Image: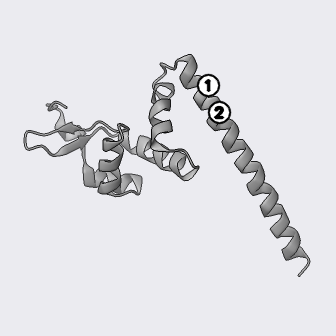
Amino acid sequence: MSQNPKSSTLLTIGETARRAGSSPRALRYYEEQGLLAPQRTGGGQRRYPPDSVERVLLYRRLIDAGLGTEVIRELLPCMNGSATADTVATLQREHKKLLAQARELEATANRLESILASL
C-alpha cells in the first residue's frame, strides 16, 4: 500500500471506525480478511478513503445477515461492477437465503403479534 500525497483527504483508522460505528479492531480484521485495503503513511499508519465508511457499514450488515467474510470477499467484484458468472451465482444464492430468512422472521413476528393480541 503506497503513500498518498493527498493524505489530508484520507481518514485515520479511529475516524473511519467512529464514522462507521465500528471499532479499529474490526477494521484491522476486515483488512486481514481482504475486505479493506488501507493506504499507509510513511510511519505505517493506516489511512482510509472516505468511501471506506460505507463499505464497513455494508460489511457489518452482510455479516449481521449471516454472510461470512469469505463469501463477502467473493462478492467484492459485484460491488465494483466487474462481476463474473460465478460471483453473480453466489450473490443470487445468498440473496435467496436472505429472502428465506426474512420470510421466517416475518412469520415469527406475526406469531408473536397474535400472542400479544390474545393477552
CB atoms of marks 1 and 2 within 8 Å: yes
Position of residue 104 relative to residue 4, above or below, is below
Q: Mark 2 = which residue?
A: 93
> Quick one: SS at disc 2?
helix
User: Residue 94 appears at what percent x and percent y?
Assistant: 62, 37
- Indicate left or right for 49 with 59 as reference: left
> Quick one: which residue is furthest to the right in this view?
118
> Quick one: SS at disc 1?
helix
Q: Looking at the image, what colour scheme do you see?
A: one colour
- Indicate left or right for 5 with 27 as reference: left
Name the one closer to the observer, 23 or 9. Answer: 23
- Say which amino acid is labelled 1: Ala
- Residue at (33% x, 40% y) in the render: 50
> Quick one: which residue is furthest to the bottom in this view?
119
- Which numbered tag is attached to residue 16? none
User: Residue 46 appears at what percent x and percent y?
Assistant: 20, 44
Q: Mark 1 = which residue?
A: 89
Q: CA distance from mark 1 to mark 2?
A: 6 Å
- Indicate left or right for 18 with 108 as reference: left
Classify 10 Å Cα crowding around label 1: few (below 14), some (14-19), many (20 and above): few
- Say which amino acid is labelled 2: Arg
Q: Tell me the quarter of the image containing the C terminus.
A: bottom right
- Residue at (74% x, 45% y) in the render: 100
The quadrant where residue 25 appears: bottom left
Classify 10 Å Cα crowding around label 2: few (below 14), some (14-19), many (20 and above): few
- Residue at (77% x, 49% y) in the render: 103
Name the one closer to the observer, 115 or 48. Answer: 115
Name the one closer to the observer, 15 or 76. Answer: 76
User: Residue 17 appears at what percent x and percent y?
Assistant: 33, 53
- Indicate left or right for 14 with 93 as reference: left
